[in-house]
Image (spheres, helix red, strand yellow):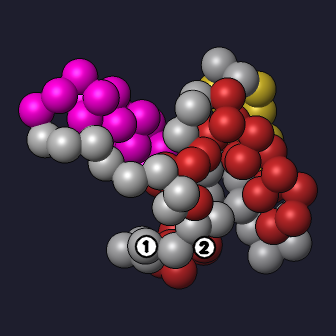
Amino acid sequence: MESTKYTCKHGSTELLSAQNYHGWKNDIMAFLGMDDALDIVLGTEAPQGKASAQARDYRKRSNRAIALRERYDTNATQSHLCGSTLPL
């Protein structure tokens, strides 16, 4: 049986479905905030240079945000989010 929850070091939430968007969004935004990646997803933090330590940190946090986004939805909702550049 496929799991209906996403769990990470910050907690767990139900996978995104047509019925739970608002609660799911609050949970995911909290997880991204605790991972210091929320501003990247919202577009309020821009990349820093190309080869600096700050640029490497930005890429690391950006990749964590992408991985989180790819893991939190169900197969039914994944097709709607695939390739989207929109924030939550």
As rendered, which of 51 and 70 lies closer to the eye? Answer: 51
Q: Main secondary structure of the magenta part?
A: helix
Task: Name the quadrant of the C terminus.
Answer: bottom right
- Residue 12 in the image: state x and y as whole percent: 76, 33
Circle 1 — which element? loop
Query: Taking the image as drawn, is residue 56 in sight?
Result: yes
Say left or right for 49 vs 83. Answer: left
Q: Is residue 41 above or below residue 60?
A: below
Q: Please tell me whether residue 35 belongs to the stretch shown in magenta.
A: no
Over which residues does the magenta segment extend? 51-69
Query: Where is residue 16, by image quadrant?
Result: bottom right
| Residue that extends furthest to the left in the rendered view of this protein | 51
Dot 1 amino acid type: Thr
Please tell me which of labels 1 and 2 falls first in the chain. 2
- Residue 86 in the image: state x and y as whole percent: 52, 74
Instruction: From the image, tell me which residue sits under label 2.
Output: 76
| Residue that extends furthest to the bottom in the rendered view of this protein | 80
Q: Is residue 49 above or below residue 69?
A: above
As rendered, which of 3 and 73 lies closer to the eye? Answer: 73
Task: Name the quadrant of the N terminus.
Answer: top right
Question: Which residue is pictured at 75% across the width and 67% down the height?
Answer: 17
Q: Please tell me whether residue 56 belongs to the stretch shown in magenta.
A: yes
Mark 1: few/some/many CA within 10 Å (<14, 14-19, 20+) = few
Circle 2 — which element? helix
Question: Which residue is pictured at 38% across the width and 53% down the height?
Answer: 46
- Residue 44 in the image: state x and y as whole percent: 54, 57
Dot 2 amino acid type: Ala
Instruction: From the image, tell me which residue sits under label 1.
Output: 85
Question: Which residue is pictured at 25% across the width and 35% down the height?
Answer: 55
